[in-house]
Amino acid sequence: MGIYKNLIDKLLKLQDRYAADVADLGGGERKCAFLNIVGVNGEQLTLKFDGAKVSYASPDEQPTEIFQCSEDTFLDLLMNPSEQNFIDKVTMGYFSIMSADTKEISLVDIEKWREGFARLGKAAKMALALAGRRTSITVTNPQQQQIPSKRSDC
Amino acid sequence: MKKIGIASGKGGVGKTTIAISLALSFTSYGSGLVDADITGSNVPDVLGYSELKVKDDRILPAEVNGVKYVSIGQIASRDLPVMWSGKDLVAAAKQLIEKTDWGNVNYLFVDLPPGSDEINQKLFPLLDYVVFVKIPSSLSESKVRRMIEMARETQTPILGLVKNFTYFECNGEKVKVFPDDGDYGLPVLLDLPISPEVAKKKIINVDPQIFLKAMEHPVLLQKRDNPLRGLAKTLLKAMSNGNI
């Protein structure tokens, strides 16, 4: 999970700088959804989507929807952002969307969030690209392996 | 709104064709269609893959030729298998029926999945009626019998039987290809031939009056006699009489 946590930390920092591109994720004003990202050893990291911003969730908050996916799926959605990729992941059961009330899959919310996730991925990709031109972003995995980002000439 | 399930224990017997044909023939009464076969949806292959929209936590159905319809095929990826848990499959099928804004639909036809699995077990109690589709095949016969038992168990009224592929017409003569081992004591609503025309159009001309008449006099197959049920009835009766 370390490498993904590191990446998410970077993205959340970049979010403030490029907030306009991430705004209105599609969940609606009153909505708040939690995304559980599950690591290979079962460890979890929970993000909160409140319609305009992504942040780490705090335990006392009550979401209206709960999403769940593996860290690989999350990374794939960020790196290949499109409605089709999102729906492919949902169809194959890699990404689940359920109502927090019923704990059942929610077709209405799949439709509501498909566009939001495509936008989130595009914004994250753009933020990383823009940030990469100004600073060197390194994502460190648990074995401390350095993965340098592409650096432009400017 | 009356909900009418189109069921058969077996796949490939013509459930979807019958369900679509019924929905199209009932448009003047206000008709809708649910493709509840989540893992094998193919209603959109016939009616089109119009995307579903949502508004205020309700699904807005697509509409073609006066029929409102919803299918998981309009949400999920077309060329990928729907790999959801049994619980999610049931929830999705129920949501297509219950969370859709059906508006002026009076007759909702539900194209049920094959088999007697959890989806059918959970959907049968939501239905007002069920129509069974069978073909003359020993593999179909045994499965339809099991589904009829399920209807009895869930006390879902059975409108009758649609017998598909029963004959073909040759020089004006009806030729039966396969032996048919009966109607299970159900009224036969339609007796359909093997027809290249149907295969091309995927639609059958159905007379709605046959089905409306059956709805007026449904063959309500009651649950099997159960001594405990009898006891409960006796107790309830005694309590209402003030004897206990």
Image (spheres, rainbow, N blue to C red):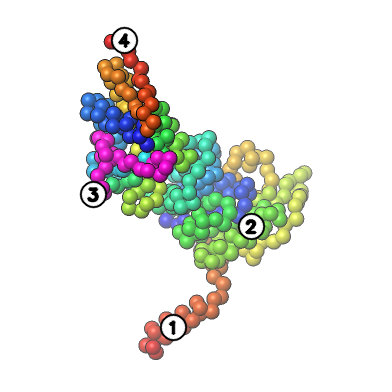
Magenta-drawn segment: A38-62
Quarter of the image for residue A22 reads: top left
In the image, taking residue A56 as reference, residue B148 lies left or right, namely: right
A128 lies left or right of B168: left
Q: Earlier in the sequence, mark 4 or mark 3?
A: 3
| Residue A69 screen position, x and y as percent | 40, 40
Q: Which residue is mark 2?
A: B143
Where residue A84 sits in the image (x, y, percent)?
43, 31
Circle 4 is placed at which residue position?
A153
Residue at 31 percent across and 22 percent down: it is A137
- Residue A60's label in the rendered image is 3
Q: Which mark is residue A132?
A: none
Q: Chain of mark 1?
A: B
Spatial separation of the CA atoms under disc 3 and disc 2: 51 Å
Residue B60 spot, x, y in % from top left: 38, 43
Q: Which residue is rendered at x = 22% and y = 28% of the image?
A: A16
Mark 2 chain: B
Q: Residues within 10 Å of mark 2 (few under 14, many from 20)?
A: some
Q: Residue at x 26, y 27 (%)?
A: A14
Q: Position of residue B193 (x, y in %)?
A: 68, 48
Q: Secondary structure at mark 2?
A: helix
Mark 4 secondary-structure assignment: loop
* Parent chain of label 4: A
Marks 1, 3: nearer the viewer: 3
- Mark 1 and mark 3 in contact? Answer it, CB < 8 Å: no
Real-space Cα separation, disc 4 to disc 2, in angstroms: 69 Å
